[in-house]
Image (cartoon, helix red, strand yellow):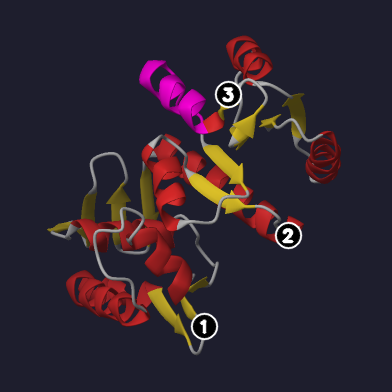
Amino acid sequence: MHILIIDDNQELLFGLEKLLNESSFTTHTASTLKEGQKAIDNCTYDLIILDWLLPDGSGVDFLAEMRKTYLATPVLLLSSKSEINEKVEALDNGADDYLQKPFSNIELMARIRALLRRESSYKKSEISIQNLKVDLATREVYVEEKAIELTKKEFELLELLLLNQQVVLTRYQINDHLNRDFDALKGSNLVDVHIKNLRKKLGSASILIETVRGVGFKIKAI
């Protein structure tokens, strides 16, 4: 898999290249938006890691313009900015995920794997486990071939769990994902409410959602 890193910090670029190459990724680097644009025009990438502040402009503005034209590649935005409204700005302008500097390599690799799993699942569109079938493109859900009506939040919750099969997601991670538009009050109890409602609607397929006591939830293999 090919990953493009756009960042002007040479020490960071060297470290990311080494880390990703050791994980069997092929990496390309760019230190400016102009170089990044040229790289994107000349190669197809599975993921782009983009810094917010670059010598020739804003990575967020660059991404917003690219999304308007043709760029569909998953983008992980890096930034030292920590305010909620700045995270919202990044997501609203096309970032698929946001990671604040400084970050641990473990968290970076986890986010990269999650984005690549999600992209792979979207390409195949349909996910089937036991008697549950979900079409990510049409947002249709079936249990034992019967259509199930889910709310927007319930579908997003189910989608998140399915795209991270066998990964335990904490209440914080789920809550952060469901409220990325920040249109609802954040609180871990809301996650439990959504889980309860989702299980009720899934009926016999609800056994796929496992509670990991004291941690969170995951989709388990049966």
Instruction: State the residue position of label 1.
Output: 215
- Tell me if residue 215 can be seen: yes
Residue lying at 47% horizontally and 79% vertically, measured from the top left: 216
Numbered badge on residue 57:
3
- Tell me if residue 219 can be seen: no
Say which of marks 1 and 3 sits in front: 3
Residue 188, above or below 113 = below
The numbered mark, 2 or 1, whose residue comes first in the sequence reads 2
Q: Nearer the viewer, residue 202 or 80?
A: 80
Q: Which quadrant is home to the N terminus? A: top right
Mark 1 and mark 3 residues within 8 Å of each other at the beta carbon: no
**Is 22 a magenta residue?**
no
Residue lying at 50% horizontally and 59% vertically, measured from the top left: 164
Residue lying at 75% horizontally and 56% vertically, measured from the top left: 105
Label 2 residue SS: loop
On the image, the x and y values in percent for residue 114 come to 55, 52
Q: What span is colored magenta in the figure?
A: 60-73
Q: Amino acid at mark 1?
A: Val
Instruction: State the residue position of label 2.
Output: 104
On the image, the x and y values in percent for residue 56 come to 63, 20
On the image, the x and y values in percent for residue 212 come to 49, 84
Mark 2 and mark 1 residues within 8 Å of each other at the beta carbon: no
The quarter holding residue 36 reads top right
How busy is the neighbourhood of tag 3: few (under 14 within 10 Å), some, or many (20 plus)? few
The numbered mark, 1 or 3, whose residue comes first in the sequence reads 3
Label 3 residue SS: strand
Mark 3–mark 2 Cα distance, whole angstroms, equals 26 Å
